């Protein structure tokens, strides 16, 4: 009962006119920043951090959290309408969101994304409110072996996502991981894999560089080539009645993905250093795995949009938990929020809940209000996003190229990265022609910098003995499940190969 | 496509070997007291990439993958034209950024694409090619405070006026 009373006080604080205005403005800004390829919640929060010094700390964190919320909703928009994931958290949304848009069902995809995000956010808020201190201690018990086992599980789900050609999928995963290793060795600080001794590689290759290259340039070239220059521009209609029908359909066909994403997303989100990207990907993989029709995934299944969208919103709320209770940021955005809190004179950690009750519960209350504001504002703007799809393709295509290059520069501020975007785009076009799945590489480049140090720390702990991943109570089962997921398709492939050889052998 | 698949696998195998060799600049084994060396992670990943290329070649030889069964060319005449005109257009666009600024390059690329590849009218092509970079300027430089490349010094007078407006 005490929690409900504190939450009620927090909501009243969030509903004060100034805070409510900050929520509405923050969500709207976040929505548009998130929808822009190349810009994500981290850019919005970082750019607007100085503005927050004009308001009290509770209003400031509410404003930044609202931007974070809005950007999480917005990330799905460019994934669905343009086929370019604006942030790593929205990569999995392109798998089914883009095919739906191509079938003229963009409104269904956008409504599904909005509703799934809302439900994911709400479930995470309830978990957050009820179990904050308990979950913080569970998350803290995750050491390097457990986090590496979790990363292994995420890679295992890639193998399931990559289609039938397992060697090409594994190649893609390893390629993304190696690209993520370029720059400096995180532990010794020595330069590593400076390709062809070009100094530009010293700064490493960012996720956005690969993602924009693959999806912004490569995907567009592939679409133009495949369509022979005659892309049918989809003309989705947008009426109130149509939107109501889409809402009903998204609830009917997307509930399973929403449920999986909401729950799984939160628990992956609270783990330090995991965050919304593995959460969205794992939810997509699990939704596909438990589906009766897994072959529908990748062809425009609403569950395939709902699962990652519910998960990334749920995980973004979850990632606030270690930040507030332990002072450990779960994502780059929460790292900036943490920095902001320190500047405002607050000390994140267990004592925050005791010493700054009004601040903490005001923030938690604002999560609920921001979530409602975000879904309403998002639904209201869907006709604007749909309008973009009505543009003739010969206008949309150059606009996407321009957005990719300008957005890429805005994110990296380096011309070397822009050239890399072009090279990755042309390379992706060639590899796509030969059926290499590229999404696993894009996701692996994000998870590589988490996976490598945890693997090395684990092996250091065990003096090089890999059994550490099997003998610990939490890491063990996760590792075993991951290995089964990787080995099963490989065994199937070998068995199929033998069967094909047997059938082809002359009698 | 069949020939293309094995050539691609060969190029990727060579790249994997290069990455393995490059990884050995740092220790790739277990360093006592310090754990796996800095080169171990990329080295073994590149080794797996090389093994995958071997499996792709094996599948090609057995004709089990769709590209290995296809007699189509990698790109037909239309495909090559598209790569040259669209892909080449993007390369020229990026090359122009450091000469005539990001906004100038956007204007030139949009006009080229809309007028010559999209075959839109002069009015629409010119209107969009001029309006888009102006809108981008106020969004990036004004609202987001992100400075884009301004090109060589001959563009300075134009940017002086624009910066005067936003600051």
Image (cartoon, coloured by chain):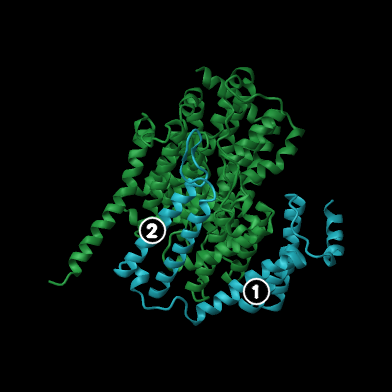
Q: Looking at the rendering, which quadrant does residue A172 occupy? A: bottom left
Chain letter, disc 2 residue: B
Q: Are marks 2 and 1 on the same chain?
A: yes
Residue that appears at 41% across and 38% down: A149
Q: Which residue in the rendered view is the most extreme toward the front?
A: B32
Viewer-nearest residue: B158 or B122: B158
- Measure the alpha-carbon separation of dots 2 and 1: 42 Å
Query: Which residue corresponds to the image point at 43% horizontal and 34% vertical from the top-left?
Result: A145
Within 10 Å of the Cα at label 2, are there few (<14), some (14-19), or many (20+) other Cα atoms? many
- The chain letter of the cyan chain reads B
Q: Is residue A26 visible?
A: yes
Please name the color used to draw chain A: green
Q: Which residue was labeled with disc 1?
A: B114
Q: Secondary structure at mark 2?
A: helix
In percent of the image, x 45 and y 54: which residue is there?
B46
- Relative vertical location of residue B31 with respect to residue A215 in this rendering, above or below: above
Q: Secondary structure at mark 1?
A: helix
- Comparing A380 with A440, the one in front is A440
Residue on which disc 2 sits: B52
Pick the residue in front: A353 or B80: B80
Give how far across and how far down residue A178 sits, in percent: 50, 52
Horizontal and vertical percent position of residue A9: 60, 23
Vertical placement of residue B29 versus A17, above or below: below
Note whether residue B119 is visible. no
Left or right of A434: which side holds A188? Answer: right
Q: Which badge, 2 or 1, comes first in the chain's sequence?
A: 2
Chain letter of disc 1 in the image: B
């Amino acid at each position: 009962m005490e929690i409900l009373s504190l939450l009620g006080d927090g909501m009243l604080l969030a509903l004060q006119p100034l805070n409510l205005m900050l929520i509405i403005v923050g969500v709207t800004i976040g929505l548009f920043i998130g929808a822009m390829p190349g810009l994500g919640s981290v850019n919005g929060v970082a750019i607007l951090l100085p503005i927050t010094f004009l308001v009290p700390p509770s209003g400031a964190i509410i404003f930044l959290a609202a931007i974070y919320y809005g950007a999480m909703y917005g990330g799905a928009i460019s994934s669905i309408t343009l086929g370019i994931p604006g942030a790593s958290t929205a990569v999995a949304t392109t798998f089914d969101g883009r095919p739906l848009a191509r079938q003229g069902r963009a409104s269904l995809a956008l409504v599904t994304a909005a509703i799934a995000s809302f439900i994911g956010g709400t479930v995470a808020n309830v978990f957050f409110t009820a179990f904050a201190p308990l979950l913080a201690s569970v998350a803290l018990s995750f050491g390097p072996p457990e986090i590496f086992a979790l990363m292994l599980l995420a890679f295992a789900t890639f193998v399931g996502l990559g289609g039938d050609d397992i060697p090409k999928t594994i190649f893609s995963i390893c390629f993304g991981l190696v690209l993520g290793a370029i720059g400096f060795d995180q532990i010794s600080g020595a330069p590593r894999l400076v390709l062809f001794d070009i100094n530009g590689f010293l700064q490493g290759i960012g996720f956005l560089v690969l993602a924009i290259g693959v999806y912004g340039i490569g995907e567009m070239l592939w679409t133009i080539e495949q369509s022979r220059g005659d892309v049918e521009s989809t003309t989705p209609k947008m009426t109130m009645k149509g939107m109501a029908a889409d809402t009903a359909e998204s609830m009917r066909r997307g509930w399973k993905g929403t449920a999986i994403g909401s729950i799984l997303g939160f628990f992956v989100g609270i783990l330090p250093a995991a965050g919304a990207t593995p959460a969205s990907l794992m939810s997509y993989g699990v939704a596909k795995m438990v589906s009766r029709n897994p072959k529908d995934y990748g062809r425009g299944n609403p569950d395939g949009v709902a699962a990652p969208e519910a998960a990334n919103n749920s995980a973004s709320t979850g990632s606030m938990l270690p930040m507030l209770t332990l002072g450990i940021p779960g994502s780059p955005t929460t790292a900036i929020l943490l920095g902001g809190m320190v500047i405002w004179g607050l000390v994140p950690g267990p004592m925050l809940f005791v010493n700054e009750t009004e601040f903490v519960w005001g923030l938690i209350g604002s999560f609920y209000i921001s979530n409602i504001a975000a879904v309403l504002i998002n639904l209201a703007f869907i006709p604007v996003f749909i309008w973009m799809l009505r543009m003739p393709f010969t206008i949309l295509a150059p606009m996407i190229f321009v957005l990719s290059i300008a957005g890429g520069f805005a994110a990296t501020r380096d011309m070397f990265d822009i050239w890399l975007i072009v090279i990755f785009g042309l390379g992706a076009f060639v590899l796509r022609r030969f059926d290499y799945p590229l999404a696993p590489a894009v996701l692996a480049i994000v998870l590589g910098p988490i996976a490598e140090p945890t693997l090395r720390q684990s092996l250091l702990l065990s003096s090089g003995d890999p059994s550490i991943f099997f003998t610990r109570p939490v890491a063990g089962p996760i590792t075993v499940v991951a290995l089964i997921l990787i080995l099963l398709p490989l065994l199937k492939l070998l068995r199929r190969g033998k069967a094909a050889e047997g059938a082809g052998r002359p009698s | 496509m069949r020939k293309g698949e094995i050539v691609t696998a060969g190029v990727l195998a060579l790249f994997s070997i290069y990455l393995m060799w490059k990884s050995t600049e740092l220790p790739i084994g277990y360093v006592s007291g310090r754990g796996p060396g800095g080169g171990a992670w990329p080295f073994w990943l590149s080794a797996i990439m090389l093994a995958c290329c071997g499996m792709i070649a094996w599948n090609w030889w057995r004709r089990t993958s769709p590209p290995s069964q296809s007699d189509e060319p990698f790109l037909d005449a239309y495909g090559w034209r598209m790569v040259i005109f669209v892909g080449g257009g993007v390369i020229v666009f990026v090359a122009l950024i450091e000469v005539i600024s990001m906004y100038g390059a956007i204007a030139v690329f949009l006009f080229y694409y809309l007028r010559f590849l999209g075959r839109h009218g002069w009015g629409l092509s010119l209107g969009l090619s001029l309006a888009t970079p102006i809108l981008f300027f106020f969004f990036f430089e004004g609202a987001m405070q992100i400075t884009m490349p301004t090109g060589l010094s001959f563009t300075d007078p134009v940017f002086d006026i624009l910066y005067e407006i936003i600051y």
